[in-house]
Image (cartoon, rainbow, N blue to C red):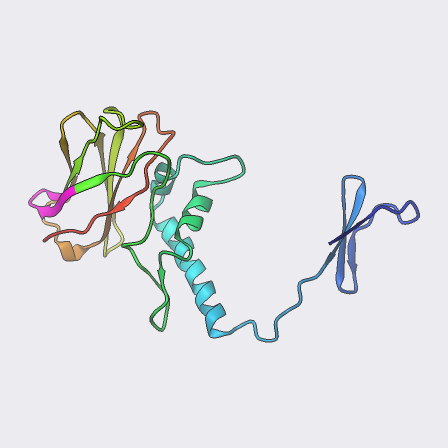
Amino acid sequence: MAVAQNPMTGQMSGTVANFVTSTRGKQNVVRSKAFKPRNANTESQQKQRGSFKLIVDENQSWGGIIDLGFPEVAEGQTSSNLFMVANLPKAIDKSGAEPVIDYSKLIVANGSLPVMVITEASIVAEGISIGYKTNVIIPKINETDEVVAIAKTTAGEILINKKVRGVEAIGTITIEYPGIQAADVKCCYLFVRSADGSKASKSVFVPLIP
């Protein structure tokens, strides 16, 4: 990129040959156009575009859950931005003919709070039961924190339950869905938020025992 300020030319804008001109403050800015590759549709590029679309669609499928999971947003960022950065390309499996999401690596929450420790997870009559260590003696952990359990069914339903962390050594949270089977659950995660909702922990994938 070249920057010029010429009293003869004044402010510049528009396209000239392979250059794009514009004005930034009192300076004229000249940028070279990106050269187009000879083949912009290679298999690798197709998978890259497919991976990007997968994560965009996944973000939208969770609705406001992503806002809950990524509250520590800096100025100029959004929770969707943080979700994209956290999951591209780590949560994409490109080993097959088409890229797919690896839900065991998908991150639906992230932040500065300590990660939850799961003690057990299983399908029960009431729904999905998840046990976790409260670890309230660890710095940055507070008994008033909000534990969040979320799941997505193979039909695309979003399930959620929230409760206060508490002070007992082991806590349990249940996502109510009577009659649900392990085969009906596409993915399940656990994370925690501060009581005021300003901070969160990284989500933990919950493998379910039928």
Quadrant assignment, res 145: top left
Quadrant containing the N terminus in the rendered view: bottom right
Q: Is residue 135 above or below residue 95?
A: above
Q: Nearer the viewer, residue 167 or 61?
A: 167
- Which percent across, then down, holds residue 168? 13, 27
The percent position of residue 70, horizontal first and vertical second, equals: 39, 39
Specify the segment rendered in magenta. Answer: 119-128
Pick out the residue farthest to the left. 125
Q: Is residue 197 left or right of residue 5?
A: left
Majority secondary structure of magenta residues: strand
Kindly indicate the quadrant of the structure image that contains residue 25: top right
Q: Give the vertical position of 94 relative to 166 (above or below).
A: below
Residue 18 part of the magenta-drawn span: no
Percent coordinates x, y for residue 179 in the rendering? 9, 49
Any magenta on residue 120?
A: yes
Q: Which of the 4 image quarters holds residue 38?
A: bottom right
State the residue lying farthest toward the front.
138
Q: Residue at x 44, y 67 (%)?
A: 47
- Residue 54 placement (x, y as % from top left): 39, 59
Q: Is residue 27 left or right of residue 193?
A: right
Residue in the image at 93% along x and 48% along y: 8
